[in-house]
Amino acid sequence: MRPTRPEPHVIPPTKLLALLVHGRLVDPAVARDALASGDPGRFLVENGHCSDAQWQQWLRTEGGTRPVLSRYELGELIGEGGVGRVFAARDKTDGSEVALKVLKPQLATDPVQTERFVREARLLMGLSHPHLVKGLRVAKEGDTIFFAMERLPGDCLQDVIGAGEDGRLDEETALQVTVEVAAALDALHAAGYVHRDVKPGNILWSEERGAVLIDLGFAVGGDAATGGETTAGTVHYIAPEQARGDGKLDVRADIYSLGATLYHLVTGSLPFEGRTSEEVLAKQVLESLSGERIRALDLSPQLHYYLEKMMAKDPALRFQDPAQLQRELTAFLDQRRHQRELEERQQKARPRLGERRGSPFDRRHPRRRR
């Protein structure tokens, strides 16, 4: 039987075959033959690789990567990580726009991944802070595990700096982002959690709210002994104690990661690079932060100091909590803005070239009319 042709909005067969191969649902050789046939669905059905119903299901769900849910109408894919995919969605019960994070099907049977995914959802639902994304609901429908979050318009900072001409933010904007993320970390710290994966890709820039910290999938209680799992996170941003796999982590590991993020935002490059993850991890532990890039870009000595203090190898030498970091950066930014406003007022008060100013004598004795 020939399968029904897909609706015009459905995923193109070429892309679907790639997803099926990636998900190990179709053999690569079979996919090539199906594509060469000109009608992949018919080829797979007639050669016994799937049923017509299965092909239609793959079309609707994009090979199982895009669920069909009773409460939510899914829109475009807006993000993807190692654990889940995030879709723009509409809640059919009230018409509200949400972001829907869906656990990847191949991980839905893994108790560890499932528990971590649900824990992230509940943590986001339990916290309320302007610089933290808000969780709304976690649920399971069929084999699909998902949670709904508020949907904020904006781009993650990884995309923002990637789209810029020089791949970086100006110093003042980057410091303001750091202040706002530190505020989010302070809320997490107060709740007893360590984020463990602070990086530009996990910070959303919203015109309404500023910097918003997202993705708490690696967050753990600060008193939890995680053992070797402390290396969870992204190797270019994790603290030395995280790279070593030390037993317990505290918020100072997040401060280090925020420092590495600040470095990337203002320089457009990573603080430590290597050919392999192991090489980067070794540099995180053994090498000092180089100031050459900072000096080459003519960044302020104060910024250099903040980076050195946030990224100190010894946690005891870093800022000890996010509130302390907030206070120091805010004071510096306030002083800098005040100085700029003062200079602007002085500039406006200066006479322009060729402009004549009357003397006090002239004002007291205006010229008489003839």
Image: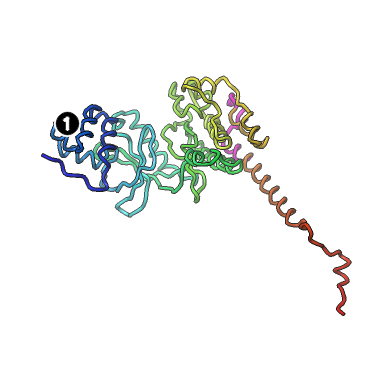
In the rendered image, residue 17 lying in the magenta stretch gets the answer no
Label 1 CA crowd tier, 10 Å (few <14, some 14–19, many 20+): some
| Picture quadrant where residue 177 is located | top right
> What residue is at 31 percent from the left and 41 percent from the top?
139
Q: Position of residue 50 (x, y in %)?
A: 17, 33
> What residue is at 55 percent from the left and 35 percent from the top?
268
Q: What amino acid is at disc 1? A: His
Instruction: Tell me the magenta residue range.
Output: 312-327
Say left or right for 174 vs 147: right
Q: Position of residue 350 (x, y in %)?
A: 77, 56
Say left or right for 340 vs 69: right
Of residues 215 and 276, the one nearer the viewer is 276
Q: Position of residue 329 (x, y in %)?
A: 62, 40
Q: Say which residue label 1 marks.
A: 49
Of residues 38 and 104, the one nearer the viewer is 38
> What residue is at 34 percent from the left and 28 percent from the top?
112
Say left or right for 351 vs 120: right
